[in-house]
Amino acid sequence: MSEVNFGDINHNFDLNNLKIGQKKEDLKYLNKTQLSIFDAIDTNEDGVLSKEEVDALKDTIKKYTEDAGDNNFSLKDAKKVLKEFKQVMKDKGGQLKANNDDLIQFLYQLFTQSGKNKYITSNENTTKVMNEYGSGKKIEEYDNKTGKLNGTEVSWENYKTKYDEKNELTERSYSNDNFGDVKETYENGKLSKKEMEKSGVKTTIEYEPDGITPKKMIIKSSKQRIETTYKNGKITQEKINQKNDDELTYTIKNYENDKIVSEHKYGDNLQKIDINYRYDDSGKRTGSTSTNHHNEQMICGSDGKVLYFKLKDDDTMYPNLGQWIVDKFNKGESIKQYFIED
């Protein structure tokens, strides 16, 4: 039996809907005498009903309704329950002055305050209670021993949020056309990590304690992984692992002020490149010079396009002869042989 008819107020209540974690201070529509009944149920006197306390109340109600052979909880049954509660208060060194009608009104308020809560899972340590409203739902997790709230999860359609025991946001997840599936993690109310996945590409961003400045970003797909590290919001290192057919390549770039020091491996070829940026008097970037481990240089304009090549032991500036030359440079091969015969 879970449903009880409170005949004297003409209302049915499901005992399974009694809320764990119900606070005494939230029962605002009871007078002082009616509210004092809470103290008889709240055995550990913390002002919150734990699972054990709620279960004990349910068992007491069941006992007298089942003894009567029906599901009706009458004023006569209330008298018997109240007798037990008065003994509890006497054992505590107190006194309970409530009458039968006070008990009925107290239980009515307790059930009404619980609303449409339903138990969904319970184990030795915690109990989860769900409340549904429209297309959304709210799940609260309570500690069975203390009755204290551990956390809350609120969701509707494709949007979900989680809160800790202090009602601070800890997690948020949602989906949209721009970013795909998104999961945000919060610490101390600030964004600490953001994960996005769309079309097989997953992007993870970790943030500094301010919740705004990026600390690390990882972009991963079936063929590529890019890890970017930041300091004070500026890029300090990039690690790029890429798979082209059966050949693996990797690149490590370390950013030092206006210089990039990088290592690039293409198959069995290891390429080391230093990139130095050029600026005009106004501070505008005008281009860059890349130097490989063959001491060959690739000179680029402000748009990143290659303009000239400078070869090892040769001060001549050769114009760019095509993308294939750039590819040879980036693959770690010496491009001298493509200009001057050894």
Image (cartoon, grey):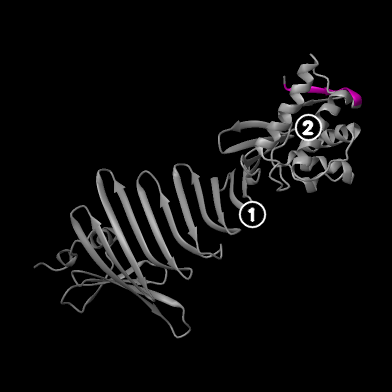
Question: Which residue occupies 64% across, 54% down?
Answer: 168
Instruction: Specify the farthest residue to the top.
Output: 69
Residue segment shown in magenta: 2-8
Residue 30 shows in the view: no
Camera-side mark, 1 or 2: 2
Mark 1 — residue?
Answer: 168
Residue 212 shows in the view: yes
Whether residue 63 is in magenta: the answer is no
In which quadrant will I find the C terminus? bottom left
Query: Of 135 and 263, which appears nearest the observer?
Result: 135
Question: Which residue occupies 55% across, 35% down?
Answer: 124
Query: Of 164 and 210, which appears nearest the observer?
Result: 164
Q: Is residue 119 above or below residue 276?
A: above
Residue 34 sits in quarter: top right
Mark 2 — residue?
Answer: 84
Q: CA distance from mark 1 to mark 2?
A: 40 Å
Please state which amino acid type lies under the numbered disc 2: Glu
Q: Look at the numbered disc 2 and give the secondary structure of its residue.
A: helix
Query: Of 164 and 41, which appears nearest the observer?
Result: 41
Q: Is residue 77 above or below residue 333?
A: above
Task: Please give left or right for residue 74 compared with residue 286 in the image.
Answer: right
In which quadrant will I find the N terminus? top right
Q: Residues within 10 Å of mark 1 (few under 14, many from 20)?
A: some
Compare marks 1 and 2 and give the one earlier in the sequence. Answer: 2
Please state which amino acid type lies under the numbered disc 1: Glu
Residue 212 sits in quarter: bottom right
